[in-house]
Image (tube, grey):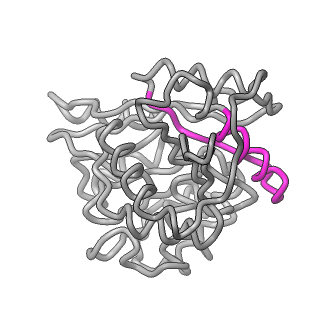
Amino acid sequence: MTWTFTDDADVFLKTAGAWLATRPAENTLVLTIAATLRSSGAQAYGDGAPVLGWWRGPDGEVAGTLVQTPPHPPLLGVVAPEAVGPLTTAFPLTTVNADRATADALAAEWPGHRVDMEQRLYRLGELIPPSPAPPGGPRSATTADRALLIAWHHAFAADVGQPNARAERMVDERTAAGRLTLWETGGVPVSMAGVSLQVADSIRVAPVYTPPEHRGRGYAAAVTAEVSRAAREAGADEVVLFTDLANPTSNGVYQRIGFRPVSDRLLISAQGNGVEER
């Protein structure tokens, strides 16, 4: 009943990957971060060495995971309640991103803690494309869109209070892989949506951004529906996304096109730190 840590994504996924895949929606962040570290290298998120950990229960089976990619705070996947106490002695935690129950358990040990963010995880049920659809249509982003996409990634990060120092790398990687889609009307891009790597037959939609001057016209719903449809056609059994609970508009938009709530996540801290979209 111990936590084990490594900086090797291959070792981590070999050990914990099958268990993570049993609940790919709830473990989406851990799965995609580990997959990115494996495909793009240990410095994919920053110069510091990553930390990947797993906890084994009394039966010897994995029942909890953690990833940290400095300078970002530690992030927990699904964690058995009995693994939380041992984690606090095995790993120095002052900030963490975790499901609500785990975050609440940790917060009880942090008098005066603060909640920096509350997010809701949604899973796509039956896709309901916007009707009527807004004018225009989708197209894959290209290298010619690079400057615009980088600006939009930074604007998205500013909107949600998550500074994004790796926007250029994210744009380049996702454009090359066909994982960024623009909604365009009259030859002008008006909204974008990206998707994560497909891991454990699951894809996460992120980020979704519409510039202020184009909001309120249904573009975000349309481009999100398009990338979700494409993800399903590409073989994803699970299509998920996160919303900021402080933004009722986005929560309503995604529910109208078929996304249903799964669980909540909190970023809690004794000092108040932010994280980037990954």
Residue displayed at 28% across by 55% down: 89
Residue 170 point in image, percent of width and height: 45, 65
Residue 203 point in image, percent of width and height: 67, 53
Which residues are drawn in magenta? 222-244
Q: Quadrant of residue 49?
A: bottom left
Residue 129 point in image, percent of width and height: 78, 30
Q: Is residue 233 magenta?
A: yes
Residue 126 point in image, percent of width and height: 83, 31
Q: Does residue 97 sit above or below 177 in this rendering?
A: above
Q: Does residue 127 sit above or below 37 in this rendering?
A: above
Residue displayed at 53% across by 70% down: 143
**Taking the image as drawn, is residue 61 in sight?**
no
Q: Name the side, left or right, on which 190 lies relative to 53.
A: right
Frontmost residue, 276 versus 190 = 190
Q: Does residue 209 sit above or below 53 in this rendering?
A: above
Q: Quadrant of residue 21?
A: bottom right
Frontmost residue, 240 versus 135 = 135
Q: Is residue 49 magenta?
A: no
Q: Does residue 33 sit above or below 272 in this rendering?
A: below
Residue displayed at 74% across by 26% down: 130
Frontmost residue, 123 versus 170 = 170
